[in-house]
Each structure stands twice: as structure tokens, then as C-alpha cells.
Amino acid sequence: MMNAFDDYKDQILNQWGLLTSSVRKKVFGANNENIDLLVDSFYKLEPPQRNAAIVGGAVGLVIIVVTFLGIYFAQLSSLNRDLNRRFDALYEIRDLKDSYLVESARFTALETSITGSSSTVRMRPYFEKIANEQGVKIDGLTESKAPLASDNALSAKFQEIRVEMRLNNISIPKLLAFLVEVEKGGGSIRIQDLQVQAKYGTKLFFDAKIKARSFAEAG
């Protein structure tokens, strides 16, 4: 940051030097010939005129000094404002970098987690295993793969696995136990949709349609 400050300060000082040099040449001449001309003219004046010229010159000199000081402090104020903006931008970039590193680490951890879980879980065998353990019968289990949406950060590396199945004539306690076991041990497997339909003639058993999804490495 200090290097940026020093570089910008040098630029301002160089511009200020060029400005003062240009003004000096215009006022005094390239070889101070305007001063010689002014002195010769001054000595040709009568004493009262010389006094008036001295007073006028002093006033003019004060005006010039005040003008140059005003320009100098205006440039200095502009420099300070610009430096403050630059420092604010640098601090913002630093904060954004820290946030990016945190989010990047989280995203990498998520990728690693999905890769690990998707490489060990096979959807159909997994659901059939849970169903056997819970004493549940699965009907019409289908499995399909689909690409993730292009705006999903995981789309470059993973695809979605979709599973649909029916559980007919099942009680609510058994259905809940089955769903809990599915999500508890399935890594990235999540229940996406659940539809429960009452069966005619009984209040204890229902037909359920389940949609679940997981991820697999795109290939």
C-alpha cells in the first residue's frame, strides 16, 4: 500500500513541478527576460509612479502566492481523497479475498464429501437393503441420471441420480422409520418428494410414492 501511495505522490509532485515550471516561464520568460524588462521600465518611472508600482506589485505578489497556495492545497486535498478511495478499495479486495478463501475451502470440503459418499453408495441396492431391514416391500423402483443445472457450482463435476419408488399398504410408523434410515446412512441421499395416499377401507395403512436424489461423478 505504501508503494502505491509513494508512486501516486510522485505523480502529483511531477505534475505540480510541470505546472509551476510552465507558469514561471510565462511570467518571467525563458531566461528571465521579463524581469529585466520590468526592472528597466520600473526605473524609468517617476517616484510617485514607482511607489504605486511597488504597492501594486506587492498586492499582485500576495494574490499570486495565495492563488498558488490555494491550487496546492486543492491538489493535496484531491490526493488525500483519491488515496482514501484507493485504500478503501484495497481493504474491500482483501475482505473479498478472505471470504473467497473461506467459501472455496467449504466448497472443496463439499466436493470431497459428495465424492466419498457417492463412490460407496449404490442407489438400488441401498434402498433394497433398508427395505429388507425395516420389513418394507418396495414396488416399481426406477433409477435415472440427469445433469445438474448449469448455474449449479457442482455441475462441472457431478450429475444427479434420481430414484422413484412406491411403498404400498404401509403404516405411517413404518414409513417414517424407513425414511429416517434412508437419510441417516445414505451419505448424500436425500428424500426430495413424498406423496401419501389413503387406502379405501382402512385408516391404518397407506400407499406412498417417494422421490429421492443423490449425486454421482459425471462421466
Image (spheres, rainbow, N blue to C red):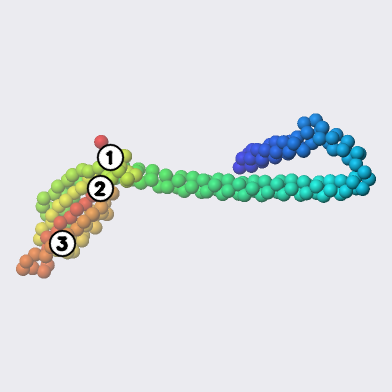
Foreground of the two, 18 or 138: 18
Label located before the other in sequence (1 or 3): 3
Q: Are marks 2 and 1 in contact (CB under 8 Å)?
A: no
Q: Amino acid at mark 1?
A: Glu
Point out residue 194 in the picture as x, y percentages from the top left corner: 19, 58
Instruction: Tell me, yes or no, if residue 132 can be seen here.
Output: no
Q: Which residue is mark 2?
A: 214
Residue drawn where x is 61% and y is 42% of the image: 1
Q: Which residue is mark 1?
A: 217
Left or right of 207, for residue 61: right
Q: Amino acid at mark 3?
A: Val
Callout 2: SS: strand
Point out residue 170 in the picture as x, y percentages from the top left corner: 12, 61
Quarter residue 176 falls in? bottom left
Q: Mark 2 to mark 1: distance in Å? A: 11 Å
Quarter residue 203 falls in? bottom left
Residue drawn where x is 25% and y is 50% of the image: 189
Q: Which residue is mark 3?
A: 196
For mark 3, does the 10 Å Cα neighbourhood hold few (<14), some (14 to 19), or many (20 or more) residues?
some
Q: Amino acid at mark 2?
A: Ser
Foreground of the two, 147 or 194: 147
